[in-house]
Image: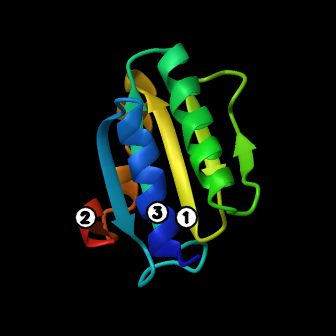
């Protein structure tokens, strides 16, 4: 599975659980750590967990490699690392605080439909 296919599936999984403000950043030109960052937020800890769980379930069914997961217990910022695609799921406050979009502003924001 290509990184763009994986990212497309992840975005769909986030949309299925009503993630808010989903952004896809193409970072291939500026970093070797991944091809895409996907950033989304949920309205509370339960939704943040549901978003992460659904992404893992959908990508697992698609036979994606097991992700490295950070932050699940706290539920304020869950990172799912699928190597070429890194998914950041935040609660609203932490997303504003960490402002990854600003930090990675050299990445190209792309429409998920273009994946």
Q: Is residue 76 visible?
A: no
Q: Residue at x 41, y 30 (%)?
A: 17
Q: Nearer the viewer, residue 38 or 4?
A: 4
Q: Secondary structure at mark 3?
A: helix
Q: Secondary structure at mark 2?
A: helix
The residue at which mark 2 appears reads as 113
Q: Is residue 78 visible?
A: yes
Rendering coords of residue 112 (x, y %): 29, 61
Name the image quarter holding residue 108: bottom left
Looking at the image, do the residues carrying marks 2 and 1 touch, with CB atoms under 8 Å apart? no
Which badge, 3 or 2, is on the more N-terminal residue?
3
Give the CA separation, mark 3 to mark 2: 10 Å
The residue at which mark 1 appears reads as 85
Rendering coords of residue 5 (x, y %): 47, 70
The residue at which mark 3 appears reads as 7
Give the CA separation, mark 3 to mark 1: 6 Å
Q: Secondary structure at mark 1?
A: strand
């Amino acid at each position: 599975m290509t990184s763009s296919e994986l990212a497309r599936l992840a975005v769909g999984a986030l949309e299925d659980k009503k993630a808010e403000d989903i952004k896809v950043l193409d970072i291939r030109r500026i970093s070797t750590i991944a091809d895409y960052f996907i950033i989304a937020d949920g309205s509370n800890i339960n939704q943040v967990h549901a978003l992460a769980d659904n992404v893992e379930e959908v990508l697992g069914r698609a036979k994606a490699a097991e992700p490295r997961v950070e932050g699940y217990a706290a539920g304020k910022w869950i990172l799912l690392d699928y190597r070429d695609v890194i998914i950041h799921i935040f609660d609203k406050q932490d997303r504003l605080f960490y402002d990854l979009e600003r930090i990675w502003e050299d990445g190209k924001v792309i429409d998920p439909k273009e994946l």
